[in-house]
Image (spheres, rainbow, N blue to C red):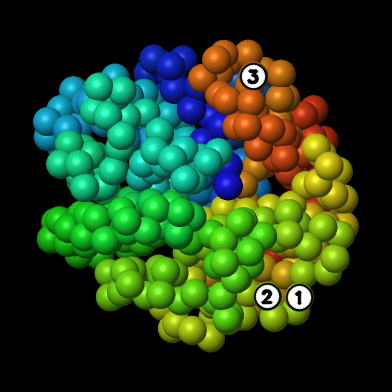
Amino acid sequence: MKKSFWLPLLALLAVGGGCAGQNEAAAPLYGFFPTPTEVSIDSLLVTLNGISEHADVVMLQERVPWADFAAGADVTSRAFADLQNLVGLVEERGLGEVFIVDPLNGLDRRRFIGVPEEWGEPSFADERIRAAYKNFAVRLAREFEPEYLGLGSEINTYLATHPHDAANFVSLYRETYDAIKAEFPDMKVFLTFQWDHLVHPEAYGLPPTQGVDWRMIEQFEPRLDVWAISSYPCFYFRNRPIPADYYRPLAQRSDKPLAVAEGGCSSETVAGVPGSPADQIRYLQAIDRQLGPRLDFWIYLLYNDLDPDSYRQATGGDFSDENLQTLSYFVKMGLVDTQGRPKASLRVWDGIRGR
């Protein structure tokens, strides 16, 4: 599913800013992706200000700067400098961060993103990709020392469609996990898994399974400090109620800490996918009722709705028509609209967070 819509902003973040320390909030931590309504610094600041009133953290899901980090962890990188500036803006507002290293396309988890063309067809067997991924993750850990560091997003989507590359990623994850834990034994390192894909693979063009395919998660044990999922159930249930036991198998399968690393429902029907204010509220209530007591953190995808024209213009020809269509599914998923006016779901979110 979607993710790093704010990435076009990094090119604009050549700004300074002091860094305050992360706020210490009681678990679970609540947060959003720092995705602004429009692709501009002013819009980003408005979004961060809004998030700071309704959350504890932001999710920073980072593309791997492949060419920069293939040579080592302690390299000079414009992309990393932009990230440092963004973290400064986040922490000035009293927010903390959850980081995820993201080697894949946030709008199409079957594909890598940003790998230099001259490297050829990307694979987790490629030593350059393995080095860059590991070095970038280690640099994030050293630079920011976050409480939570993810090493991949919705990784089961890639593994299910590229089974020949699965063992390569598993071994790379283990190597990277061990390298981080050797320096930061208390850091919580994890992956995220696309829950709806695990429960209903047939909806994504894959053979159906008998129940949840737990092997997708458990092959990474014992090197998962948190079991984290993404979930967009409204894409699947389409105006049908979310079952009362939809997420409970996750809580029953493991006694590890749990997290929702992204997810949501649209407040309007968009691009043929149904949505309503009631759908948003039902989604929040389902997560809270079924997983709430077990959550370490909960990231709702968008604080605000998106202006799709701004994102189309900012990305130019970088997005395929398919990716732009995927983007359109998320533009009404915020808890406030493009003018900052709260939806009914924001009050529900605040009520859950404030308990």
Give the distance between the C-alpha atoms of the residues marked 3 and 2, in whole angstroms.
Answer: 35 Å
Q: Is mark 2 on a helix, strand or loop?
A: loop
Instruction: Give the mark nearer the N terminus: 3 vs 2.
Output: 2
Q: Do the residues labelled 2 and 1 touch (CB within 8 Å)?
A: yes
Left or right of 307 on screen, residue 24:
left
Q: Residue at x 26, y 47 (%)?
A: 124
Query: Where does the image place residue 9, in percent across and percent down from the top left?
Result: 50, 21
Residue bearing the label numbered 1: 243
Q: Please, what is the three-letter code of the amino acid marked with disc 3?
A: Arg
Q: Can see residue 148?
A: no
Q: Which residue is drawn at 43% across and 83% down?
A: 255
Q: Residue at x 17, y 33 (%)?
A: 70
Residue bearing the label numbered 3: 312
Q: Is mark 1 on a helix, strand or loop?
A: loop
Residue in the foreground of this view, choosing between 122 and 329? 122
Instruction: Give the mark nearer the N terminus: 1 vs 3.
Output: 1
Q: Please, what is the three-letter code of the amino acid marked with disc 2?
A: Tyr
The tag on residue 246 is: 2
